[in-house]
Image (cartoon, rainbow, N blue to C red):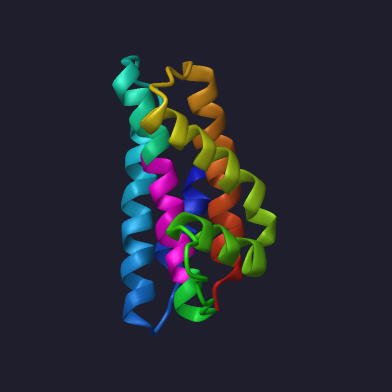
């Protein structure tokens, strides 16, 4: 399954340079997140979730390149990206939201995720969200 997702990212052909740049960064983040999941240190487990989220951030940005959505005043960038996923790739939203919440917990609440939770987020949710978003791109 991971090779399928990675080939989906690398195989996505788009003539828009901004979309290509976001897809490339998403692919790098995807690869790095997967490399961290089997590590044992707390910092590496936290970074696996954070990097997984930023993989999805770049994919959400690639959606916004093709499906512009005005960001209301006062709306955070992450909420704006979540709106883009809900509108254009809604089958990926639940996985996005779980990873986003865990990322926030790691970054702001000093959460200490167990290896099994990290693996669930990176191996299952990240895969599902990437597939859903990439499938929604033109």
> Is 117 colored magenta in this rendering?
no
Quarter location, residue 39: top left
Q: Position of residue 50 (x, y in %)?
A: 38, 38
Residue visible at 40% across and 60% down in the picture:
58
Q: Residues in magenta? A: 51-62
Q: Quadrant of the C terminus?
A: bottom right
Residue visible at 34% across and 48% down in the picture:
29
Q: Residue furthest bottom?
A: 15
Q: Main secondary structure of the magenta part?
A: helix
Q: Position of residue 92 (x, y in %)?
A: 63, 54
Quarter location, residue 95: top right
Q: Nearer the viewer, residue 9 or 67?
A: 67
Quarter location, residue 125: top right
Q: Nearer the viewer, residue 78 or 59?
A: 78
Q: Position of residue 82 (x, y in %)?
A: 56, 58
Residue 9 as seen in the image, left or right of residue 42: right
Residue 98 as seen in the image, left or right of residue 59: right
Q: Residue furthest right?
A: 91
Q: Is residue 78 above or below residue 106?
A: below
Residue visible at 38% across and 64% down in the picture:
23
- How many numbered markers are drawn? 0
> Is 55 colored magenta in this rendering?
yes
Q: Quadrant of the N terminus?
A: top right
């Amino acid at each position: 399954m991971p090779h399928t997702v990675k080939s989906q990212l690398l195989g996505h052909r788009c003539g828009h340079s901004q979309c290509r740049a976001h897809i490339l960064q998403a692919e790098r983040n995807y690869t790095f997140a997967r490399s961290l999941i089997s590590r044992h240190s707390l910092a590496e487990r936290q970074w696996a979730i954070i990097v997984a989220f930023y993989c999805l951030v770049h994919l959400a940005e690639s959606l916004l390149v093709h499906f512009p959505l005005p960001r209301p005043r006062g709306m955070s960038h992450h909420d704006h990206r979540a709106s883009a996923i809900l509108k254009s790739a809604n089958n990926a939203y639940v996985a996005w939201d779980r990873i986003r919440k865990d990322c926030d917990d790691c970054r702001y609440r000093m959460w200490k995720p167990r290896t099994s939770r990290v693996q669930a987020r990176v191996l299952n949710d990240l895969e599902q969200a990437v597939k859903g978003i990439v499938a929604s791109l033109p």
